[in-house]
Image (spheres, coloured by chain):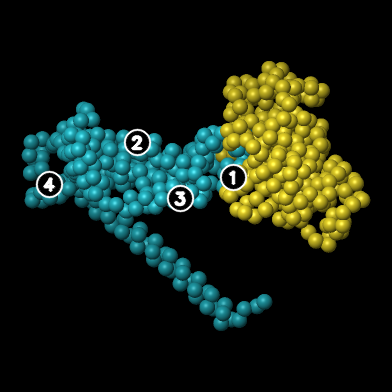
Chain colours: A cyan, B yellow
Amino acid sequence: MKSSPKKHRKKFVAAIAARVCMYLSLLAVFAFAIAIIWAVIRRGWQCITWEMVTSLPGGGFYIGKSGGFLNAIVGSIYIVGASTILGLIISIPAVFYLNVYLKKTSKLAYVARLAYDVLFGVPSIVYGAFAFTLMIAVGMRTSLLGGIITTTLLIIPIMIRSMDEVVKNVPDELYEASYALGSTRLETVKLVIRQILSGIATATLLSVGRAIGDAAGVMFTAGFSDSIPTSLTQQTATLPLSIFFQLSAPQVEVQERAYAAAFVLTIIVLIISLLGRFLTNKFSKHKI
Amino acid sequence: MTLFVKRLAKSENGFTKEEFSMFKHENEDSSGLYCEKLNVSINGNHILKDVSLKIPKNKITCIVGPSGCGKSTLLKTFNRIIDMTEGVKISGKIMLGSENIADMSFNDLTEIRRRIGLVPQRPCPLPMSIYDNIAYGCRIHGITKRKDLNKIVVHYLNEVGLWNEVRNRLQTPATGLSIGQQQRLCLARSIAVEPEIILADEATSALDPVSSKIVEDLFVRLKEDYTIVMVTHTLRQALRIADYAIFIYMGKVVEEGPAKEVFENPQNELTKNYLLGVFS
């Protein structure tokens, strides 16, 4: 059957229009990202010094005197590193329980997924306030541990829902092949983990991105300190809060320093992303 | 893992054919597979109705029938992989030796599934190297020494005629193999855990004619050591390789018997019509 020239032209125009829309959407996102990164790099690069990333804030750092924000860099790394590990330890079993042990039509799985979706959208300040209330109830003070727990709670829904979508797409044939060899459910889970390593890496990167950039969640729970914490019960600074305090300062030079901290934050995220992608490619070469 | 693999691992050059047959299932009660009054329903849909049949040992049994008649369901019920489908209800008996597979809990099924291997319709290599695809089953059943695994991998890749094709790339991803090679790898993976029975669900339907012929020939060769149950949609294939045939129509066994008799002199009108191509 041959379509008429008019119909053919209409199809052609629709295809071009769709392509232009896609291109514009991509360009809009890309332009925003570049604009933000460029602003951070341009302004951060101008005022960053080696001293800033290697020293602790001296007296009066936040009113323009010398020092650095090493405390915030280390604090952020501590919180993000620990909460990512804790998050993975909790999320991976939860995802596999939803997908391997529960039936697809399970009401528990439905309710759990709904709950994670809701939690996904809850603002981090609410997590902070919730964790703060709990901390008061158990007599705990603002500390590194408080920050780690709050950030873990914040990223768990992100991890679970991102991994859940990946596990859902694992072909049934893989489960069938594993069970047919006499594997137990746990052995099958281990096999599926090999298949979804790239998905786990993506979920981890998303979570790290959210955790490292979050200020509100840790504001009430981790507190702020000019020194590097040496135990879980000590308060700790984080980069987003350090940026916030510097931007809130009335002195222009202190505000400019905030961009130096933001620059460091961007570089850390970039390094983690590149490392994540490198490891993902390395470990997913056997993926079916 | 059973005695055979342990001995195979210890022997220097693998086993001869005679030793293979002698040791293979010496510690297992291998009195064959049969089912009685087997009923399977999925979400209230009655798929298999009072199926009673016996699978002859060391023969190729072909299950034939029109699309949707329940032949794949029957095959997947034998090792209870059908349990992966939601809403399945099984009643009746599926006996392997003295054990009723139909009544077993999920945990007990792991050993039964080792004894009843499955070759899928589309090859599904595990997300690991060619070597690990074969070694995986042995590892989960307790063989972990590299030296033992090496012998097993070589032995079973040889069994399916894949050794010479992959010997230089054992550590590369299994997904790099052609579809035909992948299917032979899946077969080698299945037999590496020493099943007594191999279930093949239209195992050649996704393959090109050359690969299909290779896999078919393999089944014919393997029947000396294994009982093979095949579901096939291709009557010509069933005619070529089946020793025993079962014709299923709308969830019921219409006719069964030696393949020659069923295909050349069918007793039932439905079988005759199916063979004549009146319906498919």
Q: Amino acid at mark 1?
A: Met
Q: CA distance from mark 2 to mark 1?
A: 31 Å
User: Looking at this view, is A257 or B141 the one in front?
Assistant: B141
The residue pinned by badge 1 equals B84
Q: Amino acid at mark 3?
A: Lys
Callout 2–callout 1 Cβ contact below 8 Å: no
Callout 4–callout 3 Cβ contact below 8 Å: no
Residue located at (46% from left, 67% from top) = A19
Q: Nearer the viewer, mark 2 or mark 1?
A: 1
Q: CA distance from mark 4 to mark 3?
A: 54 Å
**B140 left or right of A64 in image:** right
The residue pinned by badge 3 equals A107
Q: Chain of mark 2?
A: A
Q: CA distance from mark 4 to mark 2?
A: 35 Å
Residue located at (54% from left, 42% from top) = A287
Q: Nearer the viewer, mark 1 or mark 4?
A: 1
Mark 2 or mark 3: name the one nearer the start of the chain: 2
Q: Chain of mark 1?
A: B
Q: Nearer the viewer, mark 3 or mark 1?
A: 3
Q: Are marks 3 and 1 on the same chain?
A: no
Q: CA distance from mark 1 to mark 4?
A: 62 Å
Q: Secondary structure at mark 4?
A: helix
Quadrant of res B92: top right
Mark 4 or mark 3: name the one nearer the start of the chain: 3
- The relative height of residue B47 versus residue A67 in the rendered view (above or below) is below
Which quarter of the figure is the N terminus of chain B placed in? top right
Residue located at (38% from left, 42% from top) = A204
Residue A86, numbered label: 2
Residue located at (62% from left, 40% from top) = A177
Mark 4 or mark 2: name the one nearer the start of the chain: 2
The residue pinned by badge 4 equals A254
Q: Residues within 10 Å of mark 1 (few under 14, many from 20)?
A: some
